[in-house]
């Protein structure tokens, strides 16, 4: 896969799945812009490291994906993009009655509305070039639900719907838009929950992963950030030219149940 000459922007990419996507896009030769809301030396150093390791240009641009104007400014500051990966996302677990309104609004803004703003800002450039790839990182929770994750499930179902509309509005123009629906992926966020779960259930690491965390994932194996990144790269390939407006599950069989 050769993405030389293509510029990719990955939102929320200084850790986890976003970072995995950025690394795989850089490995395929794309110029990459990584992003989060912080502006620390280590964020810029991370971009420099990715660029050095893969022999491509990699920049870090700070922008808060909860702010629509900042989402649009990210695309402008980067100089537009050929590949847009909408990945930034947060979670909060609570019953509907107890769900803090601020958390609901933040999850809808970061997990759903940011994709609207970045897509709106990126499309004119893609239309002008007659080529573009938009990949939205949804979730198994874009296709199924779990209790106590109302905002997250609503936002991720929204992402799947927005993906379909984006595909219809760009069909036949060299632009595709798809959503990847990961199951459980072993990111630093998930890794950090393992010790607490081991204590809470008095189980060893392997048993907690298999019996508690991956209860809904028939493979009983985590997906990896590299596998999500590899799926993004596949969606950027010529083989995927006619794949648009759909979802690709990377979930070890979760949504087959
Ligand atoms: P993570 O916490 O490791 O990564 C989230 C990224 O988003 C981080 O880089 C963080 O800095 C960034 N971010 C958070 N708020 C932001 C904001 N306001 N502005 C800009 N960036 C912001 O989590 P992850 O597991 O890598 O999740 C990445 C995406 O994948 C999310 O959309 C998540 O819903 C989705 N996902 C994750 C899993 C999983 O099991 N880890 C499964 C399905 C879907």
Image: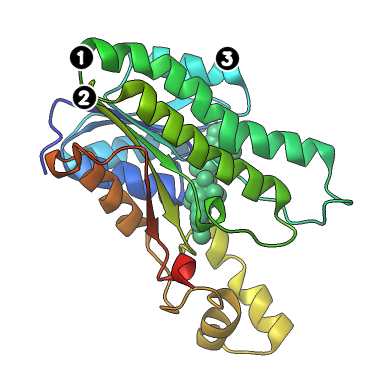
Q: Residue at x 18, y 36 (%)?
A: 241
Q: State which tag comes first along the sequence, 1 or 2.
A: 1
Answer with left or right where residue 67 lies relative to residue 100: left
| Residue 174's disc number | 2
Q: State which tag comes first along the sequence, 1 or 3.
A: 3
Nearer to the camera, 95 or 56:
95
Please say if 61 is above or below 220. Answer: above
Kindly tell me whether residue 22 is visible in this rendering. yes
**Label 2 secondary element:** loop
For discs 2 and 3, the disc positioned in front in the rendered view: 2
Q: Give the image quarter of residue 136.
A: top left
Nearer to the camera, 42 or 181:
181
The reply to whether the residue tagged 1 has its Cβ within 8 angstroms of ligand 1 is no
**Label 1 secondary element:** helix
The residue indicated by pointer 1 is 129
**Label 3 secondary element:** helix
The quadrant of the rendering that contains the N terminus is top left
The residue indicated by pointer 3 is 69
Label 1, label 2: how many angstroms apart (C-alpha)?
A: 9 Å
Count residues near mark 3 (Cα–Cα under 10 Å), then give few for <14, some for 14-19, many for 20+. Answer: some
The reply to whether the residue tagged 3 has its Cβ within 8 angstroms of ligand 1 is no
């Amino acid at each position: 896969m050769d993405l030389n000459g293509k510029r990719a922007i990955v939102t929320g990419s200084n850790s986890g799945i976003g970072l995995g996507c950025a690394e795989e896009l850089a490995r395929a030769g794309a110029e990459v812009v990584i992003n989060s809301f912080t502006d620390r030396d280590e964020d810029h150093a991370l971009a420099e490291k990715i660029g050095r390791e893969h022999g491509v240009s990699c920049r870090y641009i700070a922008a808060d994906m909860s702010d629509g104007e900042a989402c649009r400014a990210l695309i402008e500051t980067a100089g537009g993009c050929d590949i847009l990966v909408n990945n930034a996302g947060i979670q909060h677990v609570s019953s509907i009655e107890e769900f803090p309104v601020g958390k609901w609004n933040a999850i809808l803004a970061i997990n759903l509305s940011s994709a609207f703003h970045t897509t709106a800002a990126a499309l004119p450039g893609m239309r002008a070039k007659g080529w573009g790839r938009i990949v939205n990182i949804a979730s198994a929770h874009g296709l199924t639900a779990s209790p106590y994750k109302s905002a997250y499930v609503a936002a991720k179902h929204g992402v799947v719907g927005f993906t379909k509309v984006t595909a219809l509005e760009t069909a036949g123009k060299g632009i595709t838009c798809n959503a990847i629906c990961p199951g459980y992926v072993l990111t630093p966020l998930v890794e950090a929950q393992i010790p607490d779960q081991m204590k809470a259930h008095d189980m060893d690491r392997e048993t907690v992963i298999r019996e508690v965390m991956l209860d809904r994932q028939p493979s009983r194996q985590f997906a990896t950030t590299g596998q999500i990144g590899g799926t993004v790269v596949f969606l950027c390939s010529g083989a995927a030219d006619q794949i648009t407006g759909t979802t690709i599950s990377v979930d070890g069989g979760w949504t087959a149940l």
